[in-house]
Amino acid sequence: MRFFSDNAAPVHPAVMRALSEVDTLDTAYDGDRWSKQLDGRLSHLFETDVRAFWVPSGTAANCLALAAICPPHGSVVCHRDAHIQNDECGAPEFYTHGAKLLLADGDGAKVTPETLEAVLNVQRYDIHQQVPSAISITNQTEYGRAYTADEVAAIGAVARARGLHFHMDGARFANAVVATGASPADLTWRGGVDVLSFGFVKNGGMNAEALVFFRPELADATVFRRKRAGLLLSKGRYLAAQILAMLDNDLWLDCAHASNDGAQLIAAAAGERLIHPADGNEVFLRVTADEAASLRAKGFDFYDWGPGEARLVVSWDQRADDIRPLAEAIAAL
Amino acid sequence: MRFFSDNAAPVHPAVMRALSEVDTLDTAYDGDRWSKQLDGRLSHLFETDVRAFWVPSGTAANCLALAAICPPHGSVVCHRDAHIQNDECGAPEFYTHGAKLLLADGDGAKVTPETLEAVLNVQRYDIHQQVPSAISITNQTEYGRAYTADEVAAIGAVARARGLHFHMDGARFANAVVATGASPADLTWRGGVDVLSFGFVKNGGMNAEALVFFRPELADATVFRRKRAGLLLSKGRYLAAQILAMLDNDLWLDCAHASNDGAQLIAAAAGERLIHPADGNEVFLRVTADEAASLRAKGFDFYDWGPGEARLVVSWDQRADDIRPLAEAIAAL
Amino acid sequence: MRFFSDNAAPVHPAVMRALSEVDTLDTAYDGDRWSKQLDGRLSHLFETDVRAFWVPSGTAANCLALAAICPPHGSVVCHRDAHIQNDECGAPEFYTHGAKLLLADGDGAKVTPETLEAVLNVQRYDIHQQVPSAISITNQTEYGRAYTADEVAAIGAVARARGLHFHMDGARFANAVVATGASPADLTWRGGVDVLSFGFVKNGGMNAEALVFFRPELADATVFRRKRAGLLLSKGRYLAAQILAMLDNDLWLDCAHASNDGAQLIAAAAGERLIHPADGNEVFLRVTADEAASLRAKGFDFYDWGPGEARLVVSWDQRADDIRPLAEAIAAL
Amino acid sequence: MRFFSDNAAPVHPAVMRALSEVDTLDTAYDGDRWSKQLDGRLSHLFETDVRAFWVPSGTAANCLALAAICPPHGSVVCHRDAHIQNDECGAPEFYTHGAKLLLADGDGAKVTPETLEAVLNVQRYDIHQQVPSAISITNQTEYGRAYTADEVAAIGAVARARGLHFHMDGARFANAVVATGASPADLTWRGGVDVLSFGFVKNGGMNAEALVFFRPELADATVFRRKRAGLLLSKGRYLAAQILAMLDNDLWLDCAHASNDGAQLIAAAAGERLIHPADGNEVFLRVTADEAASLRAKGFDFYDWGPGEARLVVSWDQRADDIRPLAEAIAAL
């Protein structure tokens, strides 16, 4: 059984069906009838007028977002373990034309108003330094933690007070919504978020993520940037369809419920081994090399995450029966 | 009936089936068993060792190619009607970090050794000008013309003599192969092409193109550039599968045969109206505004291409019976 | 005698003296008392509130200007012989992060409303093309022509009607002012110019040019871009001093009068050989290779400017007695 | 008396004289007889064949150096207090097209093999992260410390073992040479340094720094990058002359001796207040806000450097008699 990445999971059958349903003639790029539904459907979901774009990857969503809210001579404060810092090969720098990421601390890859202020307070705000322009957080974080709506709002307050834009990397936004029980609106724009990378691929999609602007005027140049980056795919309806299928009947929430529940099973078995509370679909455990090897010998696959640490990720398609053997193996270590 | 773009066509059923066949657990990004087949399958097709990458758009393929063969302080000679100049919103400049396109002339969007030399000869080759670094041609061209293998080789000879790299934008490479009867090898690297954007989307694919390096050492940085651009999709097997399905049993050639044949029907009916010989799946006609309106009134959809000109594109899924009504309507104008 | 470039001339003694006068302790960068005078002095000269920056080169001035008025996904229309197109090794693309130059025609490197419209009218204004964002003209042009105030205003009207910004490369602005007799204000912002590269180096300065924004709000990011490009020199007072010295007692006009007058002497002798009217300090002649060789044999140095053409440039420090021998030699050809 | 920056000092009389000596006709850009001497003169000084460029600022020198040794998808390890990280408004990101700086620790802004390894060891060296490509150190550092030749060589050994290039920001290289007594060669290329930003402006120059490549093949693209950045000034002889004047009769060492000696006077008076050993011309002191105010009341000007800290910089032109009053005032606090 594979627990190394939710990227490795297959695509939800409803998404596959949706591809067939749009498999007909229509306008190229994003002029088709499905692409045109994105704004409306996501505005409804978020209870406010949004401007939404499909893009084929989370990196693309994140970096188009950052380019919209940070000039080349600006800087973005994020957690030092953020995906945009460590796992995108400098895509933020490429898309922003050289903005700088400023790195904040915090348990479980969660920044706090205090850790953000600590970074912001040592900036000089003169022409010799890149100007702090935005805050970017990941929800659920790189260590499987979820920011609550209140926590988001507290960070939003820092952003507002400092005149900063606020981006949320929601590659696992669905898991955070399920984990916190907050509404999508409360977890984002009501807390001050300007733009969200709304992930679907890890949660049952194939290759479509939504980039959602809660302040539509920020998106004016994004239409050009998406094209200019080779991200305006010519048959866009096959991306739009995936997102729409995930939204239909709250499939996105069902999938996240499934993977979060699976992670709970593992976390419950892990007990003291847990490094971070398992809010969503990822569990980080303390395991010795021998223990890790013994789990692998039993057929469980996962990533080491630094020395003595393992990351186990549950995917949307893994059922309790699939996960219980792993939970038992961990409990038996 | 729509003749405005081969991007508007649906996806070939074999490609849809291929998506289902890879719809299972596997390694993320391009570590899966299908992505790993690309190099081998394309090396076989091209009769030489190639290094190949899937990417989700033709713009991405073109611009990763250009970034591999032209430094920021370099320039690329292309036709003044080239897609990279007119239809990619500056993606070449984005990916190359500001290289310049130098524009050459030629009938039917085809450059020739002479028109290339005319551009190259007025460059000064000093530090005040960007250094000519590459030639890029489109085959089939933006006006539906195909370069023959001999024509490619003649341009390749210019490239070699000048120390320039040579890129081919093959968004409709299949149509050019069918039109010329040349082998894929003869139409590319044997004529000096270093890197090919091998298009599948317009020819029955969904959202996967192949970027093919005939000089594998040129691709070393491309692995990073693809990631850094947000183009390394996390479930890459769904892109690889499309390309493999198109290659299976020469489906890519069958599709191009179909669309080229359809265009021949139209061209034959067009007679003196033809602006360019219709080598592939695109036909450019002289029509008055009234004539264009009358065709549209009959349900035929297409783009105006400058005043008094119409572009008609045949897609892989259009059969002779679908096209004959258009041919008759044109003949009857 | 050297007539190959006004860059080769020495520095005016008043500029050298000014360097000595600021050779004392003061604040670094542009916080010193001389740098702080630039805005006021240039506002006075231009009869409007301007925001001005010293920079060490004309390329720097031009490209900071373009970066202020054209986004990466934009385009700038200029003459196909413009310095920004042919002589800056892609600096506009570097500073704008990949904007495109669109090339217009016109005699003597002068664009006209008609030639600009011809370029603008074939742009599609959709997301597949870089958006026309600015016009840039050179005054005096690369072929020694001056735009009159009326001509500038006619181009300004195109810019206004199209919603474009308007930049003037004034590497030889002084020569254009003298040639036309127009006031600095009439030749720039009253005609719609938003930002001027005001050159001093070719006219007696050492290494300081002024970048002058007539719409100060356009300059907000320029303070960062100048720093970020390594152009915010640490002892800025030595640049400010040069500009102030050139402005004192209209030295800049005196120098331009001298070089323009010298060019008139040559032009008068050239007669039918003149390729373009010699408005300023540059003369372009038809000469055979033998004639060019004979002039050089007599000690006159100049650049060939394409086959059968020679460019002769007069510098601020060349007096009539210095030039007469050349004029006579040309007349005697 | 001003102790806030060596950038505020005037220009050495010998440099002013040198400007007069080159104030004559010569070839533009760097084709003149003085610019052509740089390679030879610096090769002699460094006892090896170097390729050298004048540039008008230290930021320009640093960032052209980094662009030569780090691709856009690479990273550069430097101290977290490095000038390139904190004081250049993202110029490294601009010139490298988005490379990332990785931040290492160390007392007095000095990295060590251990602190470099600590950063390098947590990099993953896969395509999801920018590839470590270079190490950059500052000598003398931002806290006035000098790396000895042995310390440089130890870092050079890390670079060699890791396949990294090695850059030295020598804005105050002269002070480091004087402080350590090492030869210029021992302090740079013999210790593995590939490229040096050799500063003159803080040490008596006006606006010329030297960028020195000890591995000349690394500089091939630099000729274009310098032009493309607007840094190839048209009257380059006035920059070359400054560097040559500073090298004549070891003036650069005399100036650094003077400022280092002055700093020693202050440091000796400071005693326990010293935060870092004062190796060069900068002294960092612990002072309360009241103490700082009292010093300022006596006419001494300097920067606060974080709470309770003051930075005092001695310039080349300050003599012992100028400094003694400050030393006494500090001793009397």
Image (spheres, coloured by chain):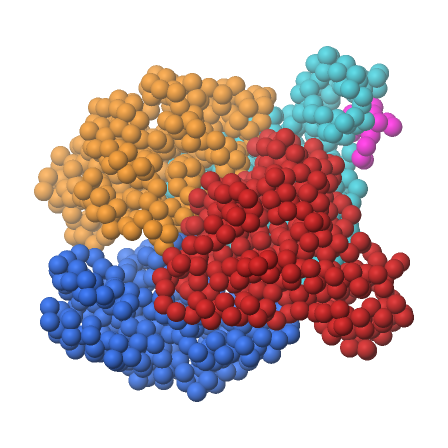
Chain colours: A blue, B red, C cyan, D orange
Image spot of residue D246 (x, y percent): 38, 23
Q: Nearer the viewer, residue D51 or B7?
A: B7
Q: Nearer the viewer, residue C303 or C24?
A: C303
Residue B155's place in the image compared with B297, above or below, is: above
Image spot of residue C106 (x, y percent): 78, 45
Q: Nearer the viewer, residue A252 or B30?
A: B30
Residue drawn 38% across the image and 57% down it: B31
Q: Nearer the viewer, residue B174 or D236?
A: B174
Q: Quadrant of residue A161?
A: bottom left
Q: For this view, does C265 lie left or right of residue D132?
A: right
Answer whether residue C265 is magenta in the image. yes
Q: Quadrant of residue B293?
A: bottom right
Residue D237's place in the image compared with B28, above or below, is: above
Answer whether residue D161 is magenta in the image. no
Residue C247's place in the image compared with A187, above or below, is: above
Residue drawn 36% across the image and 50% down it: D130
Residue A114's place in the image compared with A85, above or below, is: below
Q: For this view, does D142 lie left or right of residue B297?
A: left
Magenta stretch, overall SS: helix
| Segment tinted magenta in the rendering | C264-277
Give the quarter of the figure containing the N terminus of chain B. Answer: bottom right
Q: For this view, does A70 lie left or right of residue A329?
A: right
